[in-house]
Amino acid sequence: SGNGAREARDPSSPLKRFAQAKDAIRRAFQHLSERLAESQSFLQAAQLGSDGGGVSSLVQRTQEIQKVLSRDRMKVAFFGRTSNGKSSVINALLHGRVLPVGIGHTTNCFCSVVGGEGSEGYLLIGDSPEKRSVKSLQQLAHSLSSQHLDPSELVRIFWPKTKCPLLAEDVEFVDSPGVDMNANIDDWITKHCLDADVFVLVSNAESTLMNAEKNFFHRVSERISKPNVFILNNRWDASDSSDLAEGGEEGEGGEGIDSAGPRLMEQVMQQHLERDIKFLTGELSVTDEQTASHRVFFVSAKEVLHYRLRKHQRSADPGQGLAPGYRARLQNFEQFERRFKECLSSSAIHTKFEQHHKQGQTVVGELSQLLANQDSLLRQRREEVRIELGACQSRAQQLAQNKPSLVASGDHLVSMAMGQVGSFQSKALRD
Ligand code: GDP
């Protein structure tokens, strides 16, 4: 039911491309492992070494790739200062209250949300295999806050795929502690960012980008070449509903609206936009100006979640009670979703599967080299056997040809011996 389920059934969803690519590459590796098994048993039968003539190591490597492949997900990581709304953005994307919101300390560590089987969520903390059940958000908040976790520690939340169809599409969302916290940023990057496909900087629309936020992304782009960065100017409702936009354009009575509000908002938005684009292009140099303009959005995660939850409840007016101008913010969020999903799936296909593709090609190359070597070995053996067989044959022929003369000389010897025996006998009788 609801948007989430519709989204999951949408065959044009950009995320589907990842699933399709994963399926194609999974089948290719399946095919490869079948050919490897055939080669192995053929070489074993030909008695070219008990390890199947070196195929065993290729089988092992292929199994490793298949394991990694089955775990491959599209990973999107959210950064920004505490309380800018990172958890709220993730919840809005998931169409549900999954992460606790507004309690800074609960997200004092990294929280990853992935799809889980079954009808109930559970947590894994750090490397511990102990599954902690999470039935409610309060319980999750309590579980997180009762732990004394290192800020770079990872808490993995397995949330039922049935509750969040987006999670059934192999997406992993990672919420981070605020970049304003005095943390070991390099440690964060090593542990949680190197395999992220998309980074979302959740900024506060009420202020400009802070140095802590900028520094973090500078460090990321030193380690990852051209990371995909999106900037969400969140809490745009708070700016929009302030006295700047009093009586905004969505109000009941359209007349008499003070047009100075929206105009001023437009200017503020333009300033943010220019600064954000400058940050992505001039400062970080991660993208060109045109792409950057499609990477900056003005949203209200809080409103989007409110709207979506009410829609799921089949409310006749899901936007009821939201600040004026909410529709534009909602649309901007939807645009962000579309663009970030496109970027996410193409980046993940590229970064995750390209490696597997290269490794697969190496295995195929090594297998054909190995078979070529074994083939020449087999040819050599065949030649040796052929020569040996030839020698045997000619010897056998020789023997066969010599048989009559051998028989004759045998007969002659026998008659000679008999004659000898006869003469001995008559001599014995005479004496
Ligand atoms: P985080 O610390 O970055 O994860 O921020 P949270 O998602 O926990 O949000 C911090 C507080 O800001 C909470 O009280 C949210 O309800 C509120 N908040 C989040 N997004 C918005 C928004 O778009 N508009 C408004 N007005 N409040 C928001």
Image: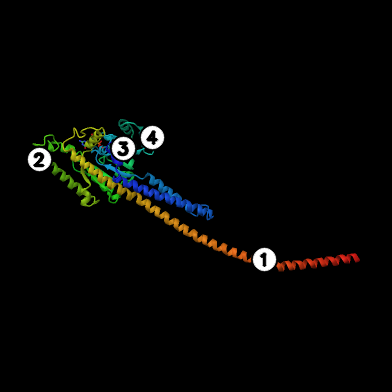
Q: Is residue 110 visible?
A: no
Out of 329 and 21, give the one closest to the viewer. 21
Q: Quadrant of the C terminus?
A: bottom right
Q: CA distance from mark 2 to mark 4?
A: 55 Å
Q: Nearer the viewer, mark 2 or mark 3?
A: 3
Q: Which x, y percent locates residue 254?
A: 11, 36
User: To which residue does mark 2 refer?
Assistant: 260
Q: Nearer the viewer, mark 1 or mark 4?
A: 1
Amino acid under label 1?
A: Ala
SS under mark 2: helix
Q: Which mark is residue 387?
A: none
User: To which residue does mark 4 refer?
Assistant: 131
Q: Which quadrant of the figure has residue 311?
A: top left
Q: Answer few, some or many: residues within 10 Å of disc 1's Cα (few below 14, many 20 plus, some between 14 and 19).
A: few
Q: Which quadrant of the figure has residue 210?
A: top left
Q: Which x, y percent locates residue 148?
A: 33, 34
Q: Nearer the viewer, mark 2 or mark 1?
A: 1
Where 5 falls versus 29 (above or below)? above
Q: Which mark is residue 400?
A: 1
Which quadrant does ligand 1 occupy? top left
Horizontal relation, residue 289 to residue 24: left or right: left
- The answer to which of marks 1 and 3 sits earlier in the sequence is 3
Q: Nearer the viewer, mark 3 or mark 4?
A: 3
Amino acid under label 4?
A: Lys
Q: Which mark is residue 164?
A: 3
Q: Residue furthest right?
A: 431
Q: CA distance from mark 2 to mark 3?
A: 41 Å
Amino acid under label 2?
A: Ala
Q: Is residue 25 visible?
A: yes
SS under mark 3: loop
What is the count of numbered marks?
Answer: 4
